[in-house]
Amino acid sequence: MNAVDPRPLTGEPVSLDLLNTRWNEDGVRQDLLKGVEGLAVWLASNALDRRFSADAATLRHTLAARDALAALVDRPGDPAASARVDTVLDHGRIRATLTAEGPGERVEFADPAQGPGWTAARDYLDLLRTAPDRIRACAHEACILHFFDTSRNGTRRWCSMAACGNRAKASRHYARTKES
């Protein structure tokens, strides 16, 4: 039986979804990856459980990748943060293949425990290639979640309009009524 993913925001690209394994709930920091059980939930949520195992080594490498990505997202372009992500990427490679369907790619790892973290780091490179300005942190001051803005005009500010967006609106309304 698979455990339910308790996070408030899921379904983001795998790199941002890895960052979103930490979140605030009622002012308390939560961390899905505090054990291999949480790693199993995250792997399943991203359809990575078919390729990778939830074990101590995979957890250790995935946490290192999450920390490297968090440093880069917090400090885009920082050489030290970029070097940390490059270190994660050093543990895998893409081999070009030719299949019956045509050209393809196969990802290879010296150690499969590096796979989930590498996959997330590689996904982040794809987001940077696609639309780096659409990688966002939630605008709510108490929220630490990240999202890829897929809105038509690229002006999304909240991880969730129902949660953080609504809280911000309620705070502004309260401030206006208090002034009156």
Image (cartoon, rainbow, N blue to C red):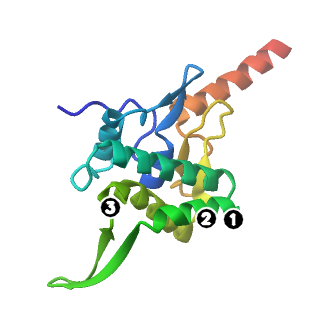
Residue 35 vertical placement versus 68 (above, below):
above
The image's mark for residue 48 is none
Q: Write the residue at 31% across / 70% down.
A: 108
Location of mark 2 (residue): 83
Could you tell me which secondary element the residue under label 3 belongs to?
A: loop
Query: Is residue 155 visible to us here?
Result: no
Asked if the residue at tag 1 contacts the one at tag 2, i.e. Cβ–Cβ closer than 8 Å, the answer is: yes
Amino acid under disc 2 = Ala
Amino acid under disc 3 = Asp
Q: Which label's residue is closer to the chain start, 3 or 2?
A: 2
Could you tell me which secondary element the residue under label 1 belongs to?
A: helix
Residue 115 vertical placement versus 70 (above, below):
below
Q: Residue 98: x, y in percent?
A: 22, 86
Q: Residue 100: x, y in percent?
A: 14, 84
Location of mark 1 (residue): 79
Q: Residue 73: x, y in percent?
A: 62, 53
Location of mark 3 (residue): 111
Neighbour tally class for label 1: few under 14, some 14-19, many 20 plus, Cα within 10 Å: few
Q: Write the residue at 42% across / 53% down.
A: 14
| Disc 3 versus disc 2: nearer the observer | 3
Amino acid under disc 1 = Pro
Q: Nearer the viewer, residue 101 or 149?
A: 101
Question: For the residues marked 1 and 3, what is the alpha-carbon distance in whole angstroms?
Answer: 26 Å
Question: For the residues marked 3 and 2, what is the alpha-carbon distance in whole angstroms?
Answer: 20 Å
Q: Residue 81: x, y in percent?
A: 64, 58
